[in-house]
Amino acid sequence: MNTIEHALSTLSSWVWGPPLLILLVGTGCYFTYQLRLMQVRKLPLAISLMLRPNQAQGDISSFSALCTALAATIGTGNIVGVATAIKLGGPGALFWMWMAGFAGMATKYAECMLAVKYRRQDERGQQVGGPMYYILHGTGKAWLAKLFAFFTLGVAFFGIGTFPQVNAIVDGARIAFSIPDWFSMAALAILVALVTLGGVKRIAKVATALVPSMAVFYVIACVMLLGLNWAAVPAAAALVVEAAFTPQAAGGGFAGATVMMAIQFGIARGVFSNESGLGSAPMAAAAARTNSPVEQGLVSMTGTFFDTIVICTLTGLALIVTGAWQGELAGAAMTSSAFTSGLSATVGQQVITLALLFFAFTTILGWNYYGERAVLFLWGERARLPYRWCFVALVAVGGLLQLDMIWLLADVVNGLMAVPNLIALLLLRKEVVADTLAYFAARQPVTGVQQPG
């Protein structure tokens, strides 16, 4: 087991080395510049579009598409991922999560805009799309589209989609409620089967019901914790910025404290959390009822804002102000320790357990859908049912792996999935910029022309 873990650690360090970090951040920075800080200027418009009803062509509403994407992104990355990043890279890792999130908003816009533009109708009459389709029809590189689909299936089976989420649920249920692991895994597998066998509309319905309420619940708990420890918040924020550029971060007591580790784990966990650049959210965006690729891109962009800029920030500050990041604990136990000391022993543990249960469950649902999209692209309709049952089987045994190995495996497959998508975004970059500028030019009121009436 140690040999496998060492091999995964080596592979993760190679995958998440400077080339991928530069590609991820560089792509986001390129679109940020070319689209003139769209994630800042157009955020109010994006939020208003998110709430606007739309009866255009598609399978689910824009808000449901966003909730489906958020179901896959707001998960253990916001609780366990932030804790892991700060444990391994120090408080400065949170700063680099911010940078990944800010640049990732522009990337998320670009990939979801392309997903709607290049979506197709499948044999069931449903709208399908995502990187596989804009790679195939936009760049003509079928091999790259298949490579992306293959890596997506790997993430769904062995990365974000199953093992990290199931492990978090099983651990939380055992610690908080003394529920046996086997019972948690069996019950979770049954629930996942009942929802996912209903397809995207049932997944979207569950996500729309759960995601907003669970996000608000967790945000309120974090704000309460920070409010009770308000005097320590300014110093915590200053430490985040200082540690991001300081070779040896203040305080010590964590596994590694170099700037490179802060950057690596901050960006890696940031991408794990918000999935900007991975190409996952575009598969949900393609099902939205909309006639405007640009508008759906804007709506989807808000997902990264809520996920990283809001929720990950609150978690990170909670870990720092309570001092939990300097202890011996890791993962969900570390975050639970922060809430236990910051609120109370009973309330703190219950908050984290409930948040993990709902976050992780909806993430499993979202990634079940993404994996299914990849399977259908590769092998067609005949593979749909075998994939669903295989996914449920992996959920049923997903709590058996060790935490460190799970996160290393997730990092590796996440990084591999991002590469073909980012290459496609750069190949289609001029198209994204031109279509976006044309859309906003058409929205501008014509000056000097007398309006009728």
Image (cartoon, helix red, strand yellow):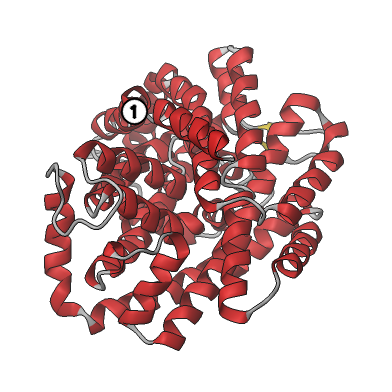
Give the residue at mark 1.
Answer: 27
In the rendered view, tell whether residue 414 sits above or below residue 420. Answer: below
Assess disc 1: are there few (<14), some (14-19) or many (≥20) residues with their C-alpha within 10 Å of its C-alpha: many
**Residue found at x 49% / y 38%:** 112
Drawn side of residue 259 relative to residue 111, left or right: left
Front residue of 166/114: it is 166
Name the outermost residue toward the front: 2
**Residue found at x 51% / y 71%:** 355
In the rendered view, tell whether residue 315 sits above or below residue 147. Answer: below
Drawn side of residue 46 relative to residue 206, left or right: left
- SS category of the residue bearing label 1: helix
**Number of callouts in the render?**
1
Q: In x, y percent, where is residue 320? A: 25, 65
Does the image show residue 129? no
**Residue found at x 39% / y 66%:** 334
Q: In x, y percent, where is residue 76? A: 50, 58
Give the image quarter of residue 177.
Answer: bottom right
Q: In x, y percent, where is residue 94? A: 27, 52
